[in-house]
Amino acid sequence: MVGVFFLQRSFHRATPSLSGANGYGNPLLSYASNWSLWAFYLSSVIRWLSCGTLSVPDQTPDNSAVWLVSTSETSDVYRREHRKNKFSTTSDIRMYRAIVQRGYKAEDPESTLEVVDKPIPSASPGHVVVHITLRPVNPYDLKLVRLGLVAGKHSFPVTVGSEGFGIVHSVGEGVTTVKPGQRVIPMTMVAMEEGNGSWQEYVSLKEEMVLPVPDTITDEAAAQFVVNPWTVIGLLRDIGVPKGEYLLQTAAGSVLGRQIIQLAKHKGIKTINLVRRPEQKEELKALGADEVICYTSEDVVSRVKEITGNKLAYGALDCVGGDVTKLVAASVRGGGHVFVYGSLASRDLIVSIPDVLRGVTVRGWSLLVEWVLPEKRKIYSQETLEYMESKVIQPLAGEKFDLAQFKEAIKKSEEVGRGGKVLLVS
Ligand SMILES: NC(=O)c1ccc[n+]([C@@H]2O[C@H](COP(=O)([O-])OP(=O)(O)OC[C@H]3O[C@@H](n4cnc5c(N)ncnc54)[C@H](OP(=O)(O)O)[C@@H]3O)[C@@H](O)[C@H]2O)c1
């Protein structure tokens, strides 16, 4: 018992290096300033516990090696993992917080999420360790948790989180593009699919997955650099609506929908925007929307005919699904395309057969297909940087919650009329 007590005290969270950091430091740390005394206690106790065979390395080579439940279980789990290694008396294990999904429970998937402590990874050659300070709660992250998608591919525990913003903590041998202390975007979307996403304080990524951020881009915008802007760029590229023609979109008040309005305007494409609440109309018009229709109170097809002089919309983007897709398909010209890229209201969609017979096609669009390709990532990153620096695309930030308040953050992220993107802070 005495040994467990002392060993536990050698674990603590990393000292926050940024303003606004969490202040979660171990209160007992203050007692640890006299390290020679601590080293003496530790060496005696650990030697007694492990007969000189216990290893306590400073850092783990990657994020997956060890994960620990905080407080009392910590030292036991850690000791089990490392019993066979060499012993070091003066090690100072720097810990950080991670939200992990422990398992999958179909009836209540979020109950399997919890905050645990993990040792900060060390930067192996060609890798960068990023201290993540902001990450959004995206619908995609929630979908992964709720459908158990990441866990379906990898063993538990897993950490989701498709994007974020942070500061370089350390770099491995051979890294030349970033240095410690630099503001960066950790592109965690690929790592997330391996269970190592941004809903944690530290992550180790390959150098090519870490993008430097210019000072012209705020932390909050940088934290939303990938998922929505890249999708907006890809959707507008592929739907191919010519300058001067109308593009129709649903959930136009979403963070992504607002960026569609911004980029379409920049490209000279006119937008017809569907929302479910009439109070969003003026706000979206002020943002650059040409037309806004509240589909819960207006006849969408008649309004679209009126706006377009009976030509209907050239193409459409839908992330709502269900009956709304039926309205969307009926509002698109014969031979036109509807890209379905989300399922906010329903995972099924309804399309009227007469619209299909008019040659309207409904197909899916997903960024997942492209973000695994390095050459595509490079193009999306460059374009996003240009659009954000020139303020063409301006991600909207919403309420902030500490990482440990993830349950409240998830709830807030799905509130009707929530506004900007909910961010988890650490
Ligand atoms: N396919 C891809 O590669 C890809 C990539 C990125 C995003 N997406 C999808 O794009 C969509 C928007 O993403 P986001 O990050 O912008 O989301 P977000 O900021 O969380 O926005 C949610 C918006 O959706 C509206 N909404 C929520 N539930 C709705 C429902 N049942 N019916 C109608 N509207 C509803 C809300 O309207 P109120 O304002 O009225 O509350 C809000 O404006 C999501 O479906 C996301 O999964 C897909």
Image (tube, rainbow, N blue to C red):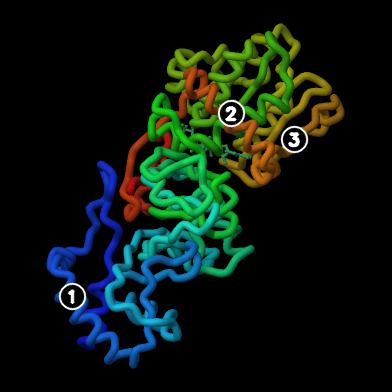
**Residue depth check, mark 1 versus mark 2: number of the one nearer the observer:** 1
Report the amino acid beneath label 1. Trp
- Residue lying at the far top in this picture: please name it: 309
Alpha carbon distance from label 1 to label 2: 50 Å
Q: Is mark 1 within 8 Å of ligand 1?
A: no
Which residue is tagged 1?
Answer: 38
Report the amino acid beneath label 2. Gln
- Is residue 276 left or right of 322 when viewed as pictured? left
Q: Earlier in the sequence, mark 3 or mark 2?
A: 3
Report the amino acid beneath label 3. Val
Residue at x 58%, y 14% (from the top left corner): 266
Q: Earlier in the sequence, mark 1 or mark 2?
A: 1
| Of residues 259 and 163, the one drawn nearer to the viewer in this rendering | 163
Instruction: Identify the secondary structure beneath mark 2.
Output: helix
Q: Is mark 2 within 8 Å of ligand 1?
A: no
**Residue 139 visible somewhere in the drawing:** no
| Of residues 292 and 247, the one drawn nearer to the viewer in this rendering | 247
Which residue is tagged 3?
Answer: 351
Name the spot of residue 327 as percent of width and height, x first. 67, 28
Alpha carbon distance from label 3 to label 2: 37 Å
Alpha carbon distance from label 1 to label 3: 70 Å
- Is residue 232 left or right of 160 when viewed as pictured? right
Quadrant containing the N terminus is: bottom left
Residue at x 38%, y 87% (from the top left corner): 53
Residue at x 62%, y 64% (from the top left corner): 152
Local crowd size for mark 3, using a 10 Å CA cut-off: few (<14), some (14–19), many (≥20): many
Which residue is tagged 2?
Answer: 382
Name the spot of residue 282 as percent of width and height, x first. 44, 15
Residue at x 58%, y 63% (from the top left corner): 151
* Residue 216 figure quarter: top left
